[in-house]
Image (spheres, rainbow, N blue to C red):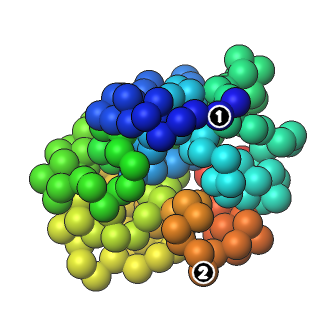
Amino acid sequence: MGFTRAELESFRDAEIEDLIGPDCRLLFVGINPGLWTAATGAHFARPGNRFYPALLRAGIIEHAIDPSAGMSDADTQHLIDRGVGITNLAVRATARADELTSEELATGGVRVRNIVRATNPVVVAFAGITAYRTAFGDKKAKAGRQDRDFEGTKLWIVPNPSGLNAHETVDTLAAKYRSAASEAGIL
């Protein structure tokens, strides 16, 4: 499946549903949906995104997931059965995360707090330190496990899997995601 630039642009500002099951133990929080994600309705769907390969390498999921043409019901159920959930700080789709305003990220932070209170995962893992710092006004936040909780949930800041985050590899992402998943009791 492929999209023209015009087709992708038609999904600008679209929103997609969160993927959160009733027994979510590890909630990943992305920055916002990309245009490919909005077009397919599947989180981290852009071809080449390293999210699902990193989850597989970490042992968080048990088989490869390719959401580039949309998420299959079986793959959605596999994530839910594994206790993995996905949401975003900002809800509107953009071509790049730097198109978001600080206000949108702060508003998204309130939204995520409400989601965490409602779903009560064991771990919440924000995929993107700069977006986290902006959303919560925490300029000193460091990558990894935080020394404080987030709405009663263990708080991690993990690298964003976007190809724009070029210094991370599938292996380095997997190692960091594995640590959060281990604390969540998934591994």
Residue marked by disc 2 = 167
Which amino acid type is marked by label 2?
A: His
Image coordinates for residue 87, horizontal then vertical, percent:
44, 39
| Residue receiving disc 1 | 2
How far apart are labels 2 and 1 at the CA level? 27 Å
In the depicted structure, whether residue 82 falls above or below residue 97: above
Secondary-structure class at tag 2 = loop
Left/right of residue 112 with respect to residue 125 in the rendered view: left
Foreground pick, 5 / 14: 5
Callout 1: SS: loop
* Residue drawn at point x = 77 percent, y = 38 percent: 65
**Circle 1 Cα neighbour tier, 10 Å, few/some/many (<14 / 14–19 / ≥20):** few
Residue 140 appears anywhere in the view = yes
- In terms of sequence position, does the residue under pointer 2 or pointer 1 come before the other? 1
- Please, what is the three-letter code of the amino acid marked with disc 1? Gly
**Residue extending furthest toward the top:** 73
Residue 124 at least partly seen: no
Q: Quadrant of residue 33?
A: top left
Left or right, residue 62 beside residue 155: right
